[in-house]
Amino acid sequence: MKDCIFCQIVAKKSPAKIFYEDEHALAFPNLNPIVEGHVMVIPKKHAVNMLDIATEDLETLVASTRQVAQKVVTEYEATGFNLLMANGHDAQQSVFHFHWHIVPRCPHDGLDLWIKHSL
């Protein structure tokens, strides 16, 4: 999609510092990271969200995302990570191209990213 910023990054028409790339996925730092090492993983093929992506593309993206998460954990010496995603406007999705946020976590990092309500 020509108006999609993530599609423009995939097409190399918009700049991004590439953290990881394979045949099907691309990862790059978030422009407004909540912690150092916060990256986003996107499929190269446009999909709006989890309900829009083809099952085969999602399966491939999961494998790529795992590799990116391992790289984030290693490079940023994290002891864990959050994998976050918003699907739809009311879930606070701001770019309508499927993407996951990988947020590296360390002891005492001051982040509280978990649901506040009892599950």
Image (cartoon, rainbow, N blue to C red):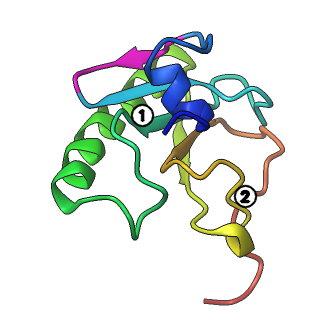
For residue 102, above or below residue 16: below
Q: Residues within 10 Å of mark 1 (few under 14, many from 20)?
A: many
Relative to residue 25, is residue 57 drawn left or right?
left
Residue 117 in picture, x, y percent from top left: 74, 86
Residue depicted at 71% across the width and 23% down the height: 36
Please name the predominant secondary structure of the magenta segment in the image. Answer: loop
- Rendering coords of residue 59 (x, y %): 20, 52
Q: Residue furthest front?
A: 2
Q: Earlier in the sequence, mark 2 or mark 1?
A: 1
Disc 2 residue crowd, few under 14, some 14–19, many 20+, Cα 10 Å: few
Left or right: 7 with respect to 96? left
Residue for point 52% across, 41% down: 80
Q: Residue at x 65, y 48 (%)?
A: 95
- Report the span colored magenta: 18-23
Residue placed under numbered mark 1 in the picture: 69
Question: Where, quadrant-wise, is the C terminus in this rendering?
Answer: bottom right
Helix, strand or loop status at disc 1: helix
Q: CA distance from mark 2 to mark 1?
A: 17 Å
In this view of the protein, which residue sits in the foreground, 40 or 119?
A: 40
Q: Which residue is mark 2?
A: 113
Identify the residue at the far left of this view.
56
| Callout 1 amino acid | Ala
Q: Residue at x 49, y 31 (%)?
A: 7
